[in-house]
Image (cartoon, rainbow, N blue to C red):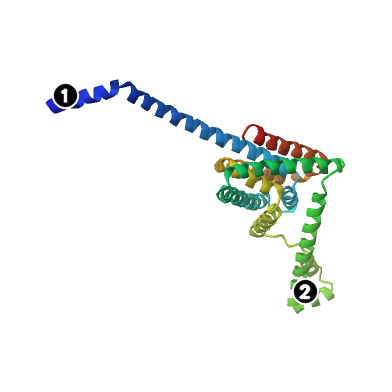
Amino acid sequence: KNGVSRFISKDTTLSKNPAISSNKSSMSVSTGDTEVDNFNGFLSAFTKSTAMILATELGDKTFFIAAVLSMKNDRLAVFGGGVLALYAMTILSTMMGMVLPNLLPRQYTHILGGLLFLYFGVKLLIDSKSMSHKVSDELEEVEDDLLKSNKKEDNENEDSLSGNDEENKTSVMNGNDDQRNYQQMEVVPGWEIVFVQSMTLCFFAEWGDRSQIATIALAAHHDPVGVTVGGCIGHTMCTGLACVGGRLLASQISEKTVTFWGGVLFLAFGLHSFIFES
């Protein structure tokens, strides 16, 4: 009983000690502040990453690749391959941004990221002045590249059909309509082929793009989880829009307008980085 009474009295004394009580309350307050700061950091990174992807990817080469491929192929295969490649690129870019503070002091990476945003913003605004209100040239470039690729595949298929079977040659010479239609029949690529084609084209088109560099800069001094999640959601929205109605939308997109507002957004990120995050 004496031991219990001493323990109770000691605990009561500790609870009544104002210094200990204040320390406990300060620890709880600091823990709550840390959680709020972490959430605010995640939300800021998420918002900036999503907005940056939407501003740079709408009307970009990867957008047009998904739009053109969806015209003649399975849209789900095009969407799956495209977003998988862009997710991988986003994760890779975020990891590169996380490594930068280990190579350079965080203060320098912060300044470098802000300068990159300002540089891209000014460059896009300057480029927009020399553009006219017409459809982006990248759409025509993507269509030409895919057309050349499809012609090459068609020639290979024709060679394989005409060179392997002697009876096919004989029947065509004799005017067999069924065999001629068989040879001229268009070979539709399978789901796996479309998936791999979309994934490969989108991955290499995104490598070295300004959205990749901007993602690296964001991850260098923002919450990497927020940057990754925001980037993936932004890519999902852009690729999904391209697969659903990208060709029609692409024909209405003004390259000058997209480039101008992309430059404005990058300038806003750069100024915000130096003014509010220094």
Q: Nearer the viewer, residue 41 or 158?
A: 41
- Please tell me the numbered disc located at residue 162: 2
Q: Nearer the viewer, residue 152 or 127?
A: 127
In the rendered view, tell whether residue 158 sits above or below residue 138: below
Let me know if residue 254 appears in the view.
no
Please give the residue where the numbered disc 1 appears in the rendered image: 5
Q: Quadrant of the N terminus?
A: top left
**Residue furthest bottom as drawn:** 166
Q: CA distance from mark 2 to mark 1?
A: 101 Å
Mark closer to the chain start, 2 or 1: 1
Residue 3 lies, in percent from the top left, at: 14, 28
Within 10 Å of disc 2 (Cα), the crowding (few <14, some 14-19, many 20+) is: some
Q: Is residue 151 left or right of residue 17?
A: right
Q: Is residue 188 left or right of residue 137?
A: left
Let me know if residue 81 appears in the view.
yes
Marks 2 and 1: which is nearer the front?
1
Q: Nearer the viewer, residue 239 or 264?
A: 264
In the rendered view, tell whether residue 29 sits above or below residue 68: above
Q: Is residue 109 left or right of residue 161?
A: left
**Residue furthest left as drawn:** 1
User: Tag 1, which secondary structure?
Assistant: helix
Q: Nearer the viewer, residue 220 or 129?
A: 220
Residue at x-position 60% and y-position 38%: 45
Within 10 Å of disc 1 (Cα), the crowding (few <14, some 14-19, many 20+) is: few
Q: Check disc 1 and give the amino acid type.
A: Ser
Residue 16 lies, in percent from the top left, at: 29, 20
Residue 89 lies, in percent from the top left, at: 63, 51
Residue at x-position 61% and y-position 40%: 230
Q: Check disc 2 and give the amino acid type.
A: Ser
User: Tag 2, which secondary structure?
Assistant: helix
